């Protein structure tokens, strides 16, 4: 999350500590045109933010199945997109789908 502009990035990870480190490292070491596919450092550097403006929230944890993780990530990305697209940092927005029957 970008605390300065109240914008959100939704992603999934296996190792939260490593993911946080990677986001902060990418923000600090961002190089235009080389790192352009990385939306988090792009947002932070282009808006002249620093790592102190970075915050993280864990929405769900202990989900083992990769398909379920992807569905949950997709759901939250699309939810924020629907509520207020301007608050979303994600540049790749997967279509909402369900592989499993929802009861």
Image (cartoon, rainbow, N blue to C red):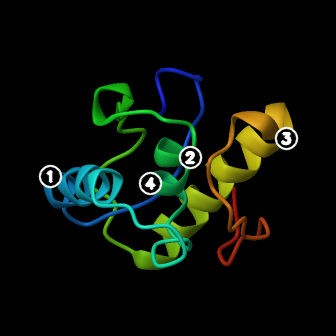
3 or 4: mark nearer the eye: 4
Crowding around mark 1 (Cα neighbors within 10 Å: few <14, some 14 to 19, many 20+) is few
Residue 82 is tagged as 3
Residue drawn where x is 82% and y is 32% of the image: 83
Horizontal arrangement in the rendering, residue 27 relative to residue 71 (left or right): left
Q: Are marks 1 and 3 in contact (CB under 8 Å)?
A: no
Residue 102 in percent (x, y) is at 69, 60
Horizontal arrangement in the rendering, residue 44 relative to residue 74 (left or right): left
Q: Secondary structure at mark 4?
A: helix
Residue drawn where x is 16% and y is 60% of the image: 18
Residue 41 is tagged as 4
Horizontal arrangement in the rendering, residue 83 relative to residue 52 (left or right): right
Q: Are marks 2 and 3 in contact (CB under 8 Å)?
A: no
Q: Which residue is mark 2?
A: 46
Residue 23 in percent (x, y) is at 31, 54
* Earlier-in-chain disc, 4 versus 2: 4
Residue 27 is tagged as none
1 or 4: mark nearer the eye: 4
Q: Nearer the viewer, residue 45 or 12?
A: 45
Residue drawn where x is 46% and y is 22% of the image: 3
State the CA–CA distance, disc 2 to disc 3: 24 Å
Residue 91 in percent (x, y) is at 68, 62
Residue 47 in percent (x, y) is at 56, 37
2 or 3: mark nearer the eye: 2
* Earlier-in-chain disc, 1 versus 4: 1
Residue 17 is tagged as 1
Residue drawn where x is 42% and y is 77% of the image: 66
């Amino acid at each position: 999350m970008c605390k300065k502009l109240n914008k959100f990035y939704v992603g999934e990870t296996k190792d939260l500590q490593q993911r946080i480190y990677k986001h902060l490292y990418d923000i600090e070491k961002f190089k235009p045109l080389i790192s352009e596919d990385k939306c988090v450092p792009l947002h932070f550097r282009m808006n002249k933010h620093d790592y102190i403006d970075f915050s993280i929230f864990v929405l769900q944890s202990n989900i083992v199945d990769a398909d379920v993780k992807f569905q949950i990530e997709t759901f939250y990305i699309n939810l924020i997109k629907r509520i207020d697209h301007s608050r979303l940092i994600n540049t790749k927005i997967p279509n909402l789908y369900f592989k499993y029957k929802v009861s």
